[in-house]
């Protein structure tokens, strides 16, 4: 065990055998926070995957050369974030890594794939229907005109994370459900020669309905993030209107705020 003031590198085993922790005991940053940060980073990178066991607090404190209260505090901070769960008779287990998505004109599939989150898609509906008033206004088509309605369930590591509904002008392109289950909508649009240029987007929150909770593996009334987006191509034509919902326990939007000069 390293003495106070030393820079200790501790490799835990066997559940944490893939990780090499760096704990700076001379740092003003508390040891529990250092440990929590490194565990969270490992979960986000996928080094610690959903279902992995960390062991109990006594074993972890011995493996890491830390006091049991320090380990308990680190674990509790990640339990509070929804990244770990304590299971009686089993120990501490990784639940998932929260998806952190930047606010930019990209689609969820590409963002998840780039983050190593292993996205999969289930196409729930792919139909041509009359446009309701709000959809017609967003897409600039006559009310009752034909639009493609696309509903998809997006998962990461096998767990549901979002319900996606997209409306597109029916004449824009043909959408093949099989292809949409293996790639993202924006990739399909780009391959059809559609160049996305800009979008207007609104982010909000609300409680899950019973149907939404069932699909997203949540409790009815659980917090959901909402997103509405109208995307435009490089000619200024609206090509997509989206209404998406995300599990707040698994998903967040990242903002970068700048001061106006």
Image (tube, rainbow, N blue to C red):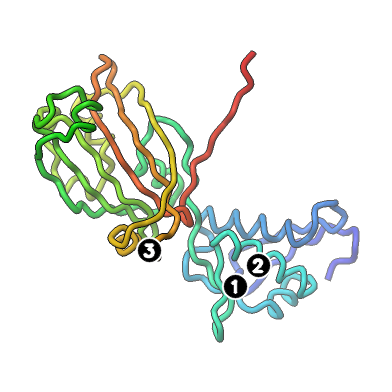
Up the image or down, 258 lies above or below 150; here it is above
The residue that appears at 56% across and 83% down in the rendered structure is 88
**Can you identify the residue that label 2 sits on?**
75
Residue 54: image tag: 1
Disc 1 residue crowd, few under 14, some 14–19, many 20+, Cα 10 Å? many
Q: Nearer the viewer, residue 165 or 198?
A: 165
Residue 56 percent coordinates (x, y): 64, 79
Disc 3 from disc 1: Cα separation: 30 Å
User: Is residue 85 in view from this perspective?
Assistant: yes
Q: Are marks 2 and 3 in contact (CB under 8 Å)?
A: no
**Can you identify the residue that label 3 sits on?**
220
Residue 25 percent coordinates (x, y): 84, 58
The residue that appears at 15% across and 29% down in the rendered structure is 169
Residue 79 percent coordinates (x, y): 59, 65
The residue that appears at 13% across and 28% down in the rendered structure is 143
Disc 2 from disc 3: Cα separation: 27 Å
Residue 81 percent coordinates (x, y): 58, 59
Disc with the residue nearer the chain's start (2 vs 3): 2
User: Is residue 158 in view from this perspective?
Assistant: no
Up the image or down, 32 lies above or below 45; here it is below
Up the image or down, 168 lies above or below 99; here it is above
């Amino acid at each position: 065990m390293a003495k106070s003031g030393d820079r200790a590198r501790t490799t835990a085993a066997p559940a944490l055998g893939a990780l090499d922790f760096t704990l700076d005991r001379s740092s003003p940053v508390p040891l529990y926070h250092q440990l929590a940060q490194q565990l969270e980073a490992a979960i986000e990178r996928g080094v610690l995957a959903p279902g992995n066991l960390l062991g109990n607090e006594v074993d972890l404190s011995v493996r890491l050369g830390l006091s049991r209260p320090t380990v308990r505090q680190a674990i509790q901070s990640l339990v509070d974030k929804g990244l770990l769960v304590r299971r009686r008779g089993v120990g501490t287990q990784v639940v998932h890594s929260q998806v952190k998505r930047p606010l930019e004109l990209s689609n969820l599939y590409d963002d998840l794939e780039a983050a190593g989150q292993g996205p999969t898609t289930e196409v729930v509906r792919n139909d041509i229907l009359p446009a309701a008033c709000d959809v017609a206004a967003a897409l600039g088509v006559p009310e009752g005109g034909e639009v493609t309605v696309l509903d998809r369930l997006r998962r990461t590591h096998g767990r549901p994370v979002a319900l996606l509904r997209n409306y597109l002008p029916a004449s824009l392109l043909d959408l093949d459900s099989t292809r949409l289950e293996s790639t993202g909508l924006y990739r399909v649009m780009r391959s059809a020669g559609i160049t996305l240029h800009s979008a207007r987007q609104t982010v909000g929150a609300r409680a899950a309905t019973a149907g939404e909770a069932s699909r997203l593996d949540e409790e009815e009334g659980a917090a959901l993030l909402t997103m509405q987006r109208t995307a435009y191509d490089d000619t200024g034509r609206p090509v997509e209107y989206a209404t998406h919902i995300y599990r707040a326990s698994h998903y967040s939007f990242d903002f970068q705020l700048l001061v106006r000069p």
